[in-house]
Amino acid sequence: MLSREHLDPVLVLQVLQAVSSLSLLAGHWPNLGGRVEEVRLALGGHAGVTPRQLQDLLEAARRWESMDPRLHLLYVRNIHHGAVQACAWVALFQDKSQTPSGACYGVLRSMWVDLYGYAPPIELVPTPQGSNP
């Protein structure tokens, strides 16, 4: 377990930026919120985190920041829905070999159409390679 005093100051800054980047989605999604809170506590000197936890959070923030802003709105507004949580999990934490089920993807596509009024012109569940059903 790592604590703040054992972290490189540059890494601490990167992690703080990641926490900030994910804060809106984390506020609506307890699964992500718990991960972010663990890291916040560690940075505050109240807990420790593993290098893997930091790496996962940094990667999730990088993926979130690279998503189209329209997807941010779609995910934040609908993250309470299990299908959207499954898609968000794949988009933020899974490798390119993981894809959401067709049913989950269909629900997300339907929510896009309801929100924007047209078929999605972008990938709804971007992955490192950008390949999905």
Image: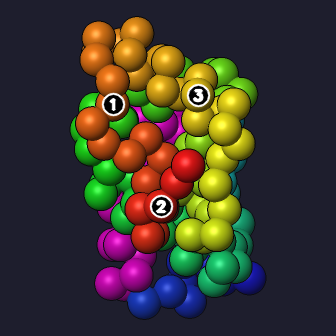
Look at 66% across and 38% down and name the residue there.
102
Comparing 100 with 22, the one in front is 100
| Marking on residue 120 | 1
**Disc 2/disc 3 C-alpha distance (Å):** 16 Å
Q: Image check: 11 left or right of 70?
A: right
Q: CA distance from mark 2 to mark 1?
A: 15 Å
Inspect this view and state whether residue 37 appears: no
Q: Which type of secondary structure does the marked residue at label 1 adopt?
A: loop
Residue annotated with mark 3: 106
Report how far apart the C-alphas of labels 1 and 3 lie in the structure: 11 Å
**Residue 54 appears in the rendering:** yes
Image coordinates for residue 28, horizontal then vertical, percent: 55, 28
Q: Quadrant of residue 122?
A: top left
Residue 14 on the magenta segment: yes
Q: Secondary structure at mark 2?
A: loop
| Residue 72 falls left or right of residue 75 | left
Which residue carries the number 2 mark? 131
Identify residue type, mark 1: Pro
The region drawn magenta spans 9-27
Residue at image point 48% right, 18% down:
111
Few, some or many C-alpha atoms within 10 Å of disc 1 (few <14, some 14-19, many ≥20)?
Answer: some
Q: How is the image coloured?
A: rainbow
Dot 3, how many residues are within 10 Å of its Cα: few (below 14), some (14-19), or many (20+)?
A: some
Q: Nearer the viewer, residue 8 or 44?
A: 8
